[in-house]
Image (tube, helix red, strand yellow):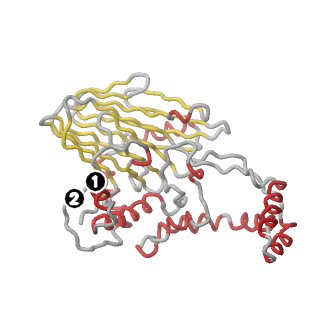
Amino acid sequence: MPDFMLKEMPASCWNEAVPLGNGKIGALIFGGIFREKMVLNHEKLFNCSKAETPGPVYMNMDRIRNLILEGSYKEAEEIYTRSIKEAGTDHLKIDSYQPFAFMFIGQSIKKVFTDYSFKLDFNKAFTEISWKEGEVSLKRSTFISYDKDVICICLEADRKGYINARVNIEGGSGAKGLLETSLETDDDFLIYKAKYPNGLNHGAVAYMRNIGGSRYHDKDNIRVKDADKVYVFVKLYMWEDDGKAVKRIKKDIVKCDYSVLFRSHKKKWKELYGKLTLDIGQSNRPVTNEMLLSKSYNSIASKQIVHTMFNYGRYLLISSSKKGGLPANLQGLWNGEYNPAWSSDYHLDENIQMNYWPALVSGLNDCMMPFYDYFDSYTEDYKENAKRIY
């Protein structure tokens, strides 16, 4: 049975986009042809506020417990609610997980396109968008290097000199009034910088390399004309002096080799994803997500959709939880809004735990480590909070 996911059409919003991730850096791929949109994410990018210490409410806990035992639930709730308001605990700000940046790739369409396909390969953790323009076949492939933290993109066609494209990075409409952003361009690099009012900064450097044709830039884009093939490499940085970070990344990113990075990426990825295979005896005929879902609306789930969902779940956890990093948040590693639902944070009332239920039974022990490490690191804080509250 195929270990990949197929879509018939591009995403219309970030929730429908196809996720890529290496456990630290994420991207949401929309799958457009004329205008590809990618939401970039970094596991550590939260809109950080000053830490507040909750006030004590333990003085009323004995009374609240006794009221509950007596069955006076409403009175107990009123006292508890009043207590946390008086302590200032009811309005503590939760830091929201943030989009890192929005990247756009524009490609000139010379004829009406046909044979569109949008594929996510679970085995190799890469996306491939393909289509035809008349007799010309085109393809755009993307992966995020598991071991080198580089977003790697390849544009290609089977006719020489066919590719005209541009690349842009911005903060998106939601960034206005929330953070300062800037973009610098030259014939080789796009340099995106962003800073929050609290001084915390982040940025991205994109490098374009073309085979054949010419490369040039304008105010907001790097462009290529009449190229045979185009590579785009992107690296992110956080909480680092912009000048030093950009200089360091420029030096490294020009050395990137798509084929070398992809070979290394596939090997590292396979070490985790290859720990388990599922065989439930279904044909190898590729079926799109849209077709699988359509057939499931009558409450009959095919073996193929079960197989796809099972492997997609493992794929998502490997993509969003990497040993030595942060655990997957409420949305894994991906977010396209500056004010996401529930702040896309770490809810401990079962939500985060649910992300990890399948981990150990499917051999993803390494992906569990960020979960353990995260909560172990806050043990003393939890003790202090428990004293203040209970």
Instruction: Determine crowd level at label 2: few under 14, some 14-19, many 20+ residues with C-alpha closer than 10 A.
Output: few
Residue at the image point whose x is 41% and y is 32% from the top? 168
Side of 358 relative to 374 (left or right):
left
Q: Nearer the viewer, residue 152 or 99?
A: 99
| Separation (CA) of disc 1 from disc 2 | 8 Å
Q: Nearer the viewer, residue 275 or 177?
A: 177
Q: Nearer the viewer, residue 254 or 334?
A: 334
Specify the farthest residue to the left.
Answer: 135
Side of 200 relative to 127 (left or right):
right
State the quadrant of the C terminus: bottom right
Q: Nearer the viewer, residue 112 or 194?
A: 112
Residue 47: x and y in percent read 62, 45
Dot label at residue 334: none
| Residue under label 1 | 6
State the quadrant of the N terminus: bottom left
Tell me the amino acid under the disc marked 1.
Answer: Leu
- Cβ–Cβ under 8 Å for marks 1 and 2: yes
| Residue under label 2 | 286
Residue 33: x and y in percent read 29, 37
Side of 280 relative to 193 (left or right):
left
Residue 20: x and y in percent read 39, 52
Side of 179 relative to 142 (left or right):
right
Tell me the amino acid under the disc marked 2.
Answer: Pro
